[in-house]
Every structure is written in structure tokens, then in C-alpha cells.
Image (cartoon, helix red, strand yellow):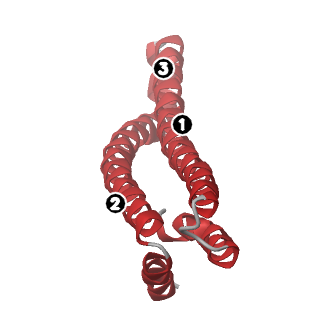
């Protein structure tokens, strides 16, 4: 699939070098965005894992030493601490999911704006006889190729 996508990019560049150049520029920008997304996702995943490990260890200790906790009267305090840690874990997981979702939406918006630009540029090029209708249809047909190459 990956090789086919690159063959399609070369085909687009041979059909029209201006739109092909725009295609390559957008593709480079989306690759940079994807590299940044992976770095942020890795950082968020490590933070979420650290918080969840801490929460699970506290819960395990509470379960193991249930009798000691009752005899010392620490139930209310431990309930409060465990609830705080569970809320931190939930917030961290939510932050991870929202960040990933924001990157996904940004990528889709960029690809859609690119499709609109290609549409307008292709119409203009057809008006000045730099592009035929058949070539224009082929170029616009392969606009979704960016969705498959990135992410």
C-alpha cells in the first residue's frame, strides 16, 4: 500500500508539476506533523502509565492491608487518596485521548484545505488551458491518497 501511494505521487507529478509540487509540500508538512504527534503521544503515554502504576499500587496495598487500615481508622483518608489518584489517572487518559484526537482533526483539516486548493487551482488551470478535464479528474481522484500515506 505504501509503495502504491508513492507511485501515485510520482504519477501526479508527471501529470502536472505545479499540483504535484503542492502535493509534495503538503505531504512533507503532514509527515512533520505526524513526527510531532508521535513524540507528544509517547510523552503523554509515559505520563499516563506512571499515574496508572501509582494508582494500581495504592489500590493493591489497600486490598492487601485491609485489616490494618480498619484497625488504624485510615479508611476515610485512603478513600480520599485513592479517589484523587483515580481522578488523576482519568484526567491523564482523557488528556492523552484529546491530544491524539486534536492531531487527527488538524491533519484532516489540512488535507481538506489542500483538496479545496487543488480544486480551485485545477479549475483556474483548465480556464487558461494548462490542464485538460481528464487530467483534472485524475488529479482530484487521487487527493485522498494523502489520508492513506499519513497516520
Q: Position of residue 69 (x, y in %)?
A: 47, 23
Of the two numbered discs 3 and 2 on the same chain, state the one appearing first in sequence. 2
Quick one: SS at disc 3? helix
Q: Position of residue 130 (x, y in %)?
A: 53, 68
Q: Residue at x 58, y 70 (%)?
A: 131
The residue that label 3 is drawn on is 84
Q: Position of residue 140 (x, y in %)?
A: 64, 67
Q: Using the image, determine if residue 88 lies above or below residue 107.
A: above
Q: Using the image, determine if residue 2 lies above or below residue 132.
A: below
The residue that label 2 is drawn on is 28
Q: Are marks 3 and 2 in contact (CB under 8 Å)?
A: no
The CA span between labels 2 and 1 is 24 Å
As drawn, the label of residue 98 is 1
Q: Residue at x 48, y 62 (%)?
A: 151
Quick one: SS at disc 1? helix
Of the two numbered discs 3 and 1 on the same chain, state the one appearing first in sequence. 3
**Relative depth, front residue between 138 and 77:** 138
Amino acid at each position: 500500500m505504501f509503495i502504491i501511494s508513492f507511485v501515485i505521487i510520482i504519477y501526479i507529478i508527471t501529470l502536472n508539476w505545479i499540483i504535484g509540487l503542492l502535493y509534495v509540500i503538503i505531504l512533507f508538512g503532514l509527515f512533520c506533523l505526524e513526527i510531532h504527534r508521535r513524540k507528544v503521544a509517547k510523552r503523554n503515554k509515559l505520563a499516563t502509565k506512571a499515574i496508572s502504576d501509582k494508582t494500581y499500587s495504592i489500590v493493591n496495598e489497600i486490598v492487601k492491608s485491609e485489616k490494618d487500615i480498619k484497625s488504624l481508622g485510615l479508611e476515610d483518608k485512603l478513600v480520599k487518596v485513592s479517589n484523587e489518584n483515580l481522578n488523576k489517572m482519568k484526567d491523564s487518559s482523557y488528556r492523552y485521548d484529546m491530544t491524539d484526537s486534536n492531531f487527527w482533526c488538524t491533519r484532516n483539516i489540512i488535507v481538506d484545505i489542500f483538496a479545496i486548493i487543488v480544486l480551485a487551482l485545477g479549475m483556474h488551470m483548465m480556464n487558461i488551458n494548462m490542464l485538460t478535464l481528464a487530467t483534472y479528474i485524475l488529479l482530484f481522484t487521487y487527493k485522498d491518497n494523502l489520508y492513506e500515506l499519513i497516520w
